[in-house]
Image: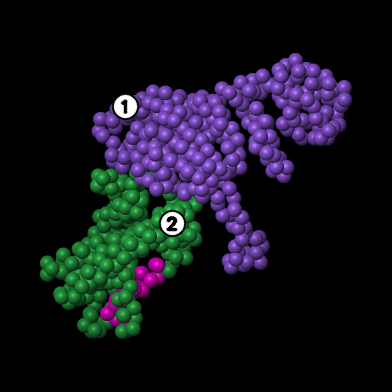
Amino acid sequence: MMRSYSEITKKAFFRNTAYRSEVWLRIFGNISIVFIQVSIWTALLGTGSLNGINIETMITYSLINTSVSMILMNKVIYVVDDKLKTGNITLDLLKPINYPLLLFWDQLGNVIFQVIFTVVPTILITWFLFGLTFPTNPYFIVAFIISLFLALVISFLIGYLVALVSFWFLTTFALDWMVTALITVFSGSFLPLWFFSDGWKFVAEMLPFQFLGFIPAAIYMEKINIDEIVWIIGKGTMWALMLWFVAQLLWWRAIRRLVIQGG
Amino acid sequence: MIYVEGLSKEYKQFNRASGVIGTIKNLFSREHTIVKAVDNISFSIEQGEAIGYLGPNGAGKSTMIKMLTGILVPTSGKVTVNHLVPHKSRQEIAKRIGIVFGQRSQLWWDLPVEDSFELHRRIYNIQDKDYQKNMDIFLDLLNLKEFITRPVRQLSLGQRMRAEIGLALLHNPDIVFLDEPTIGLDVIAKDNIRNFIRQMNRERKISIFLTSHDMKDIEEICGRMLIVNKGELIYDGTVEQLKSNLSASKIITIEFVVDPGDAVVLENAVLVNDSGIRKTFRIDKGLDSAIDFVQNLSKRYPIKDFVLQDSNIEDIIRMYYRSLEKDNSTQMTKQEKLSVIY
């Protein structure tokens, strides 16, 4: 069984290689984002610091946050949306395979491709241009890897849930727009959660979006108390389980009302 | 192996009002009508049988396939495939069925054809020995050799369909659903595919469930055909039977000088198409009565010209579809509809 899923990942990886020019555009795009953020924070912070955050910290933060955003899977919405619109979902449903898992492993192929061909080059170039700090405590390194995995799973589940909702509306654009906005704000990609006011910080901590950027970056930078990490990772796991549960529930309802478009 | 009893599927179809006001109205309230895509259909299919499922566009053919494969839940009625209820055991049934949609592709668009086969092998968990055996056969019979290493997007439609069919049969399914597999193909490619499907059906006892608008597909592959219209099953029998019922009959198209109107009602003749001064009749008792028919008719109405032809299945089906369209207003009973065929 595992063999079939890993084969899907492999094929998805190679599918990406068909469009190589995109790689260069993405690397260029990423570096632009980091550059813009670094410029803004240089203007704001100068040589000083705010809440214990200085410009070096913000460079690392921007890079990690941007990199994590590159591996998020919430765009799985568009895969499902396209399949619903064209009716090609039929073909996936006729395979003796679990549909959400098929989607996940397919997305994983894209992510692996992104990591190798855009994230790693982006990090290397940014490191060269702006400098970068690395975590030293192995405890944080392990926690960081776990948090990356949580970011994958939670972003996938959010995207998948929205896709399931589109079984009812047969359109996803507005929903994805909303989710993208929520991720942009609450994953801290505009503004780290450190700078949020208490009220908004509370809201951000109640939502799963902080796991899609802020948490991995904060762990990487060792900006979270060591005894808090277990609690935070536990919270992320709870989110993943809860989203999975809701997704399963919606899936059973969605499949009952599935209307396959086009003949 | 397939058992269907009293199966129905209804869709809600939303009525969209047009115009600006209508569009605004649609945002808040939506009226719907119930459309019966499949209406109380019963039949069963044995292992190794080849079924042609025929009907005009919108007759509910795809809906039937989707219910048989478990991706649509029936509104009412019973359906089992291999003793399992499709929508409850979708993944289980999926292992034993193969699917080809003429209008969709299972192949990975950007990857070489062989990659799709490789993936299929993993997903269906095909033993190496079976995989090798089938690949050897398909490479040869479907002539996949010439393009197996090429990306799918570079294939011609004929090549792609050959690959699709090979893929659908790779895991030795018990039944293959073919939804218009020869659509858009040239004559040679069609022949190629028909021969292959027929061979698989005969040699491997794979059941075939074929929908097509090409009567030749059905004549050449299927022993039995089901004809549906507006969701209802209106013919279930052998292709031979349908042919022999029709073989004695003649189709005669008469051009009148003036339109005699609906008044033309004659014994031994069925009006199958009426376009004013041109009317087409079917005469069930061979050539002699056809000549009698023309003679009798010409005594009463002046005739300009007439064409006599043997009826083949395709013509009859075509006229049959047309007559069904007309019957929309005047509701015919099922028996009456059948009488057009028999």
Q: What is the magenta range?
A: A179-197
Indicate whether residue A63 is drawn in magenta. no
Q: Find out whether residue A186 is within the magenta segment.
A: yes
Quadrant location, the N terminus of chain A = top left
Q: From where the camera sits, is residue B337 visible?
A: yes
Which residue lies at the image location 28% right of the left edge and 36% below the top edge? B126
Q: Name the side, left or right, on which B194 lies relative to A188.
A: right
Residue at image coords 27%, 60%: A119
Q: Disc 2 residue type? A: Ala
Please report the residue visible at 45 percent of the width from the left and 28 percent of the height from the top.
B49
Residue B309 vs A41, above or below: the answer is above
- Residue, disc 1: B136
Q: Is residue B154 left or right of residue A140?
A: right
Residue A254 — which label? 2
User: Which x, y percent locates residue B297?
Assistant: 83, 23
Q: Does residue A117 appear anywhere in the picture? A: no
